[in-house]
Amino acid sequence: YTFGFWIYGASDGYEALRKMKAPALQETITIGPETMTRDAFYQRMFYRAAMARTAAIPSKYRDDIIGGDTLMTGANRVLGYAIGMRLVANVLDDPKLKADVLAHYQPIMQEIADAQGRYSGGFPLLGEGDRYQGKGIHYDAGYTRTHMDVLISGVFRTGDPLLVQMLQRY
């Protein structure tokens, strides 16, 4: 899930290149057996990244690192990944791929939004915790700042209602 923050940063850079109409995006390149424009490769890469953790919603997801409820043990990573998914939907040109990402994003993000304020241990979701009646940061402020940046950027770049709701609750 941590690579959601990579998706966030890389998609920022990608959007900037597209906005400035960087000629390099239209170069034809070959990677392995595939030849296409750099832009097409980026589109494919972002789609694959967005879909990489869609096998299960966060509370059900397990791998060799995440052995328990991810909402309790790594919710900020999960939130970063979900925001990354939503940002990818913004940059995809193919409407079918965009719809596919959004269809998988919705249940993941809904579970995260519904969980805000429920946990106070581990790495809790932003803006929760018993210490400050559900409104404070009760662990490393620098670490939290990174997650706030991603949440705020997600709100500004997408206007997604679930992200807006989380920011308002915060």
Image (cartoon, rainbow, N blue to C red):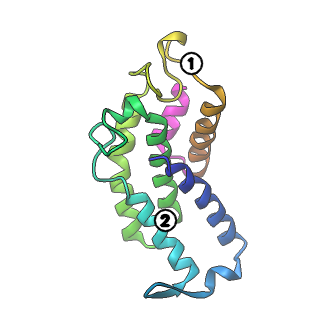
Task: From the top left corner, tell me how far across and down residue 3 is, in percent.
Answer: 50, 52
Q: Secondary structure at mark 2?
A: helix
For image coordinates 63% across by 58% down, the residue present is: 12
Q: Is residue 99 above or below residue 116?
A: below
For image coordinates 70% across by 76% down, the residue present is: 21
Q: Is residue 90 above or below residue 160?
A: below
**Does the magenta stretch mainly form a helix, a strand or a loop?**
helix
For image coordinates 66% across by 31% down, the residue present is: 142
Query: For mark 1, what is the residue?
Result: 138
Q: Where on the picture, by quarter, is residue 38?
A: bottom right
User: Which is more toward the observer, 54 or 90?
Assistant: 54
Q: The magenta stretch spans which residues? A: 158-170
Query: Given the current orientation, which residue lies at the most extreme right position?
Result: 20
In space, the residues marked 2 and 1 are separated at their CA atoms by: 33 Å
Query: Given the current orientation, which residue lies at the most extreme front position?
Result: 64
Q: Which mark is residue 46?
A: 2
Q: Which mark is residue 75?
A: none
Q: Residues within 10 Å of mark 2 (few under 14, many from 20)?
A: many
Q: Amino acid at mark 1?
A: His
Q: Amino acid at mark 2?
A: Phe
For image coordinates 36% across by 35% down, the residue present is: 70
